[in-house]
Image: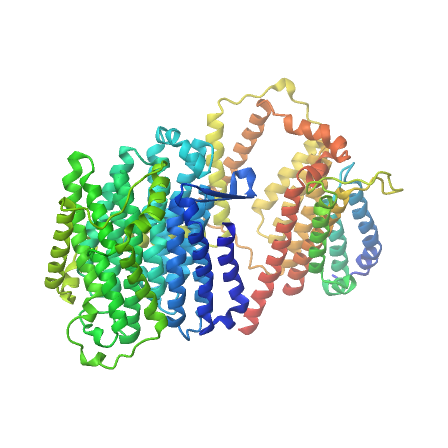
Amino acid sequence: MKSPILQSASRYLLPILLLFSVFLLLRGHYYPGGGFVGGLVAAIAFVLHSFAFGTAESMKMLKYKPSAIIPVGLIVAAIAMFLPVLFGLPVMTGLWIEEPIPVVGMIGSALLFDIGVYLVVIGVVLTILFTISLETH
Amino acid sequence: MLFTILIGLITSCLLIPLGKYFRSPVSVALALLPVILFGYFVYHIPQVSSGETLYESTKWVPSLGINFDFRLDGLSLLFSLLITGIGSLIFVYASSYLKGHPYLDRFYGYLCLFMSAMLGVVLSDNILLLFIFWELTSISSFFLIGFNNDSAVSRKSALTALSMTGLGGFLLLAGMVLIGEMAGTYSIGELINASGVITEHPLYPLVLGLVLMGAFTKSAQFPFHFWLPGAMKAPTPVSAYLHSATMVKAGIFLMARFTPILGGTPLWSYTLLIVGGVTMLYAAVHSLFRTDLKGVLAYSTIAVLGVLTFLIGLGTEEAFIAAGTFIIAHALYKASLFLVTGVIDYQTGTRDITRLGGLRKVLFPVFVAGTLAALSSAGLPFSFGFIGKDLIYEATLTAGDPLRILLTVVAVIANICLVAAGFMAGIKPFAGALPTQFADVKMPSALVWIPPLILGLSGFALGCFPDLAGQYIVAPTVSALTVEPVEFTLKIWHGFNTVLLLSGITIIAGTVVYLFNKPAVSKIAFVERFNSYTPHYFFQKSWITFRRFSVWYTGFMHNGFLRSYLIKIIIFAEILLIYELVKGGPIYIDYGKLIPVSVHEGINVLILLGAIYLTVTTTSRLTAVVGTSIIGYAICLMFVFYSAPDLAITQFTIDTLTVVLFVFVLFNLPSFLVVAHGNRSIVIRDALVAGLFGILLSLTAIKVLQVPTVKDISEFYGKFAYSLAKGKNVVNIVLVDFRGFDTMFEIVVLSISAIGVYSLIKLRLKTSEKD
């Protein structure tokens, strides 16, 4: 499946899709989107790359094993969950920075939590797909 | 009081890393733990005996009404003293008995755990907390009974004990939850005040049955007694500890604890009287047919437990006094007899009564301990057993009139057998001529003969000064059962009366039985002929049947074929749906509310139908995969048309990934199995199941429209999404904020499934590489 057309297309599509996935992640609080969908789109971006260049090549590009992203995501989500405890609030209370940040907008612990979900989803999907693809070919 | 429990738990945890420093001979130092705890409880005797009840509370799960509430009243004190006091001697004894055992540290770990669990049971003031410790005793005793884990018999006995007590524990929990629901509290103190509410509740018989099942299985009452003789496979210190003072007495404790809550009704009294009476007669007679020393002790223990159940059922103040006294007397002499048996077994290598004899010449101090214990168990004057037995007769004689004679006769017969059994275990191995094979038996270390001697001597010390135990321990115990202060004095001499006469008859008859009953293998064979009528046999049979059923059931439900799972799941769902739809009444469609179908929607449906047709008729897997993904995308479009963009995006990405996954594995799958080919009946069956499912789901969807929807929840989220969570996308707000906990667990589950896939594939390859 090493077609030059797909290879050059995915070279440009990968960053665009990743950007789109971040866009989905960030707008999730106000418009359709969110960490789960964003994560899936990002995973698809890498899968597309692996179709064009082969899974081994994609793994090389990622530098880290996709399974290593899972714990990072879980830790980020857990931090978002327990952050309010430091401020003496119950677990999972939403914390917000008073002033909106340019481009990104309002930032709160919910976004941090969503980033955790985003990372876990990427890690899980890529772990499953890449493992199967590497071991069965 | 929490510390008395924690200290044992901590010690057992510390023994995991530090265990290797506590193998013999240093292990005897661990006995300091129960000794200190014993001291703590002794220190509290004056306070408790003056009528005070000590409370202590630490919050745990206040929202469920479960807290570390502890109480120290007379009843708790009696048991705590036995647990720690006898525990101290067991700790000392075991350090020598199991000297050099490679797992001695592990043994002490289990023992500490068990002791803490027992203390937890007797000190809890919250029935749910009591239950937790109750289960902990079952689990820790499983490890103790199965300590010789390289023997299959030992493992089986441990499992039997665990399954019987576990079954009881399960029922007990149900009973306790019911009690909590009825009275609205789990605190024992408050339950005692609410006793009337429970005993007059229509469900009272059920509660009583459940709680008593817990107590009966634990205390080895007929017909659940058989796990106890099996548990004799444990090392002797364990038998001594579990069966004299702790494990089996937990059931007695439970009945005593619940006497002021559930007791006092005819149902309670008669159940306990009958079960206790049958148990004591059955086991007392049985004990005479045993040739294994531990077998004799096991059956006489069951008999004593029967007596105690019987006394609690009697429910009079005299009966409670007798029970309290007899618990102490029995714990002292039975622990001593077990320990003596252990020494004999260890030094001679046998516990067979028919072969043992004359050991007094080689094991003199052990002989003294055995004799003291046997005499106390026989109830000779100046032993504490004498006081106990007198009180039992006094209790039966003062019972209500129609039963008086019957109860007394039952008690006398059981006690006669117990006297004989006590002599068999404590005197028989030492009496008569010494067989030559035992001539060079060595004296064991003092650490193993001093503990039984202490127990034997304290039996006589208390026998000479009975009121020492009576005033300080038994009286507060009884007042914990009757919930009012009681006044009495335990005396050795009551004058010439019926009780004394019965005592005399018991001792003489028991001695006669002992002299004429020659334990022999032939007698065991005679008893075993009735084995197929015993409860043990019945339970074994039902286990085997249950296992057969499980094998069949697993084969039927879990046969490894995905299509078989799917069809079963779908049929089950269909049954549920049919039930709900039939129950829900007629279905009608309000045509006025429907909106017309637009052209693009119609086209989408046509694509959907075409894709479905393609999927079910194709003979190529690739086509089927493409077909299902078209179905998925068509559904995505539906979501887009009906304004559910979040669902649409998610469905779209998931569908894409599914196709990718299929493509990855396509070449490795077995050839596409078209089951239907050449087998019309399968096609028809599948078509029926699938078609019916589709129809039912459509009907459900129509039904949903006519049921007025509850909008509270969606309105709540809609209203507060912005004000509380500062977001406008309600779906996402629900995911990351309102139900954030769920999402957290979901991503954890996702991670676990990724690990699962990863390890399954890696493992599979490793084994194939080996091949």
Percent x, y of residue B615: 60, 45
Q: In this view, does B326 lie to the left or right of B104?
A: left
Given residues B110 and A91, the one toward you in this image is B110
Percent x, y of residue B171: 38, 43
The answer to whether residue B680 shows anywhere in this view is no
Splitting the image into 4 quarters, where does residue B72 fall?
A: top left
Residue that protrudes farthest toward the right in the picture = A102
Percent x, y of residue B118: 42, 53
Residue at 53%, 54% (x, y): give it: B673
Residue at 61%, 44% (x, y): give it: B614
Q: Is residue B91 left or right of residue A129?
A: left
Scheme of colours in the image? rainbow
Percent x, y of residue B679: 45, 48
Residue at 22%, 61% (x, y): give it: B374
Splitting the image into 4 quarters, where does residue A124 fall?
A: bottom right
Relative to B605, say whether B516 is above or below: below
Relative to B138, say whether B52 is above or below: above
Given residues B399 and B183, the one toward you in this image is B399
Residue at 50%, 22% (x, y): give it: B586
Q: In this view, does B427 lie to the left or right of B653?
A: left
Given residues B115 and B231, the one toward you in this image is B115
The answer to whether residue B633 shows anywhere in this view is yes
Residue that protrudes farthest toward the top in the picture = B592
Splitting the image into 4 quarters, where does residue B516 fall?
A: bottom left
Given residues B270 and A76, the one toward you in this image is B270
The number of callouts visible is: 0
